[in-house]
Image: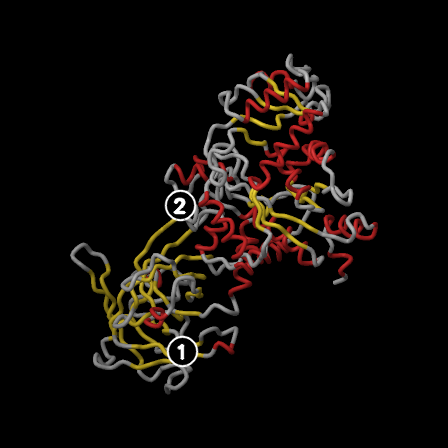
């Protein structure tokens, strides 16, 4: 495909800047998260975009934490974000920065604005500031403190810094235009008082810059060329430009803000505030719960960084908001794993099968493909004996029409093994099926028996009961009901009660040799990953995704 036709609109802007020599052919981006929670899939798109552009143009990308709100921030979030960016395959090298690195610079710049008559200390309360600001249809009105002298503003601002006033008692505001059609330009707040200890600066400061003031200055200080952010900041761009207008760059270059549409995935909560609520209310096990759309959660769920990067690349970069179906994300992980995940046999809901005519003291090793779509992965041995497990759902005592699995008097083939017939159903005192007694066609072994080519309609997967691995199978589904409102409305009422089902299963003995993070396709059940909760006695596995590719079917229909 012609590269010209694959450029997104941001790359087109960069190309034009390079042609005009706007930044001397420099391309310098940044990923600027606030350390007030774990990152989610929407942030993954921004990470891939910013670091991807830096790599494509042989430029630079900074990792910078906008840590300007000490009451909501924590070192835990800083470390989690660093892990997430690195896991996705990107490196910030030595360019790790914090807004708090620049607090002294921010303060000095604020003094400069005051001296130039561009900022003032206001005594209005938060509610009064909102009232004075006006509406979209009505202009705002000036604060009675707007015309304080430069000297008074400098003294008050220094007293704010020195801790003389309580939280909310005073703020520093920009002096712009209270009649501006853009409400963001109606004397926005630049500094507020927050008596809270900061995770990096301790108690040095009790005044903190707001995001709309700090962020453009950070970009200017780091000499960012293209400040890429999501679409909700489009109305803030005039304020961004106002803040950097007074910045003196050594080459006269100012960063430019470019907005793109955020990532929305149907039936997923894409808000750090709401994700925090799920954690605080104990509705999930933590930020890395595999049902969470956090990067930590999808990593533990078993998704690969390659699949997430592919997903972000496929959805593209646009200016208009849109919503992606979860099936699209699932298609990406299937595509990534189909040729590299070994295929093992496990039984999620086991029922025991005893082969009455197979020697009880005999165990043989059968050969199985590790991945039938990738011959390079070779074959493995798996044991077979007279005691097996099959899926409970693969047996029906009174089979319905077109049920081609095991039933009384019916035959099926065990994959890589023999044809068996159910002769007797053994039940416990409660009438529940305890085990099945079956006879085995000893001449029907796959690949070698006299009756190896004998045809039966059903083929089942199975596990040797005598050396099976004990498994805890965590079957994850959407955290929100698929018929719910997703991230809108009262999302807590849309929690899916069946988002996690835990079963006690059995797996091939060979699975015991693998470790947490290893991924597999379990025949007929989907893709799974070994979880960190596994012990020497129980292998804990998370279902990543089922085998059914609904996205491919939707594409065919369209």
Q: Are marks 2 and 1 in contact (CB under 8 Å)?
A: no
Nearest the eye: 461 or 39: 39
Q: Position of residue 152 (x, y in %)?
A: 64, 17
Nearest the eye: 404 or 487: 487
Residue 238, by quadrant, is: top right
Outermost residue to the left? 429
Residue 185, by quadrant, is: top right
Q: Position of residue 555 (x, y in %)?
A: 62, 56
Q: Is residue 358 above or below residue 350?
A: below
Q: Which mark is residue 380?
A: 1
Q: Position of residue 159 (x, y in %)?
A: 55, 22
Q: Residue at x 52, y 25 (%)?
A: 162
Q: Earlier in the sequence, mark 2 or mark 1?
A: 2
Mark 2 crowdedness (10 Å alpha carbons): few <14, some 14-19, many ≥20: some
Q: Residue at x 44, y 66 (%)?
A: 520
How many angstroms separate mark 2 from mark 1 (CA)?
37 Å
Q: Position of residue 305 (x, y in %)?
A: 53, 58
Q: Is residue 136 above or below residue 462?
A: above
Q: Residue at x 40, y 57 (%)?
A: 542
Residue 381, by quadrant, is: bottom left
Which type of secondary structure does the marked residue at label 2 adopt?
Answer: loop
Horizontal arrangement in the rendering, residue 242 relative to residue 419 (left or right): right
Name the image quarter holding the N terminus: bottom right
Nearest the eye: 102 or 374: 102
Nearest the eye: 205 or 480: 205
Residue for badge 2: 286
Q: Residue at x 32, y 77 (%)?
A: 383
Horizontal arrangement in the rendering, residue 404 relative to residue 249 (left or right): left
Total marks in image = 2
């Amino acid at each position: 495909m012609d590269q010209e036709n694959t450029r997104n609109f941001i790359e087109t802007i960069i190309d034009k800047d390079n042609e005009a020599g706007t930044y001397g052919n420099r391309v310098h981006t940044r990923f600027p998260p606030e350390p007030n929670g774990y990152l989610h899939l929407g942030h993954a798109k921004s990470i891939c975009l910013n670091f991807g552009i830096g790599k494509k143009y042989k430029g630079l990308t900074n990792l910078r934490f906008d840590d300007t709100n000490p009451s909501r921030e924590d070192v835990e979030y800083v470390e989690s974000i660093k892990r997430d960016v690195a896991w996705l395959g990107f490196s910030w090298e030595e360019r790790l920065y914090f807004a708090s690195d620049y607090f002294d610079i921010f303060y000095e710049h604020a003094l400069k604005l005051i001296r130039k008559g561009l900022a003032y200390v206001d005594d209005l309360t938060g509610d009064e500031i909102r009232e004075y600001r006006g509406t979209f249809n009505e202009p705002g009105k000036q604060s009675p403190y707007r015309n304080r002298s430069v000297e008074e503003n400098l003294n008050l601002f220094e007293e704010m810094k020195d801790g003389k006033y309580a939280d909310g008692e005073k703020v520093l505001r920009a002096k712009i235009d209270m009649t501006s059609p853009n409400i963001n330009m109606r004397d926005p707040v630049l500094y507020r008082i927050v008596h809270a200890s900061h995770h990096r600066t301790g108690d040095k400061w009790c005044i903190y810059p707001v995001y709309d003031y700090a962020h453009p200055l950070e970009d200017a200080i780091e000499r960012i060329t293209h400040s890429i952010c999501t679409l909700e900041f489009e109305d803030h761009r005039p304020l961004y430009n106002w803040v950097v207008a007074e910045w003196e760059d050594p080459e006269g270059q100012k960063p430019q803000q470019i907005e793109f549409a955020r990532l929305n995935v149907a039936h997923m909560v894409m808000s750090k505030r709401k994700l925090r609520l799920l954690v605080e209310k104990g509705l999930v096990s933590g930020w890395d719960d595999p049902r969470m759309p956090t990067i930590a959660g999808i990593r533990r769920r078993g998704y690969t960084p390659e699949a997430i990067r592919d997903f972000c690349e496929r959805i593209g970069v646009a200016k208009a908001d849109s919503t992606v179906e979860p099936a699209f994300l699932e298609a990406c992980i299937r595509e990534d794993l189909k040729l590299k995940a070994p295929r093992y046999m496990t039984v999620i809901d086991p029922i025991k099968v005893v082969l009455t005519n197979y020697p009880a003291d005999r165990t043989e090793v059968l050969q199985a493909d590790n991945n039938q779509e990738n011959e390079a992965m070779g074959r493995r041995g798996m044991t077979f004996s007279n005691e097996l497990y099959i899926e409970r759902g693969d047996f029906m005592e009174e089979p319905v029409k077109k049920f081609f699995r095991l039933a009384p008097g019916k035959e099926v083939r065990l994959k890589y093994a023999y044809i068996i017939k159910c002769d007797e159903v053994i039940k416990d005192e409660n009438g529940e099926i305890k085990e099945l007694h079956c006879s085995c066609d000893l001449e029907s072994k796959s690949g070698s028996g006299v009756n190896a080519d004998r045809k039966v309609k059903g083929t089942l997967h199975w596990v040797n009961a005598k050396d099976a691995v004990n498994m805890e199978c965590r079957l994850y589904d959407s955290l929100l009901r698929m018929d719910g409102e997703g991230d809108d409305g009262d999302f807590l009422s849309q929690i899916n009660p069946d988002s996690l089902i835990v079963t006690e299963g059995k797996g091939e003995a060979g699975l015991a040799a693998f470790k947490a993070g290893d991924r597999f396709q379990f025949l007929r059940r989907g893709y799974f990953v070994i979880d960190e909760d596994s012990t020497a006695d129980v292998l804990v596995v998370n279902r990543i995704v089922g085998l059914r590719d609904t996205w491919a079917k939707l594409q065919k229909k369209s």
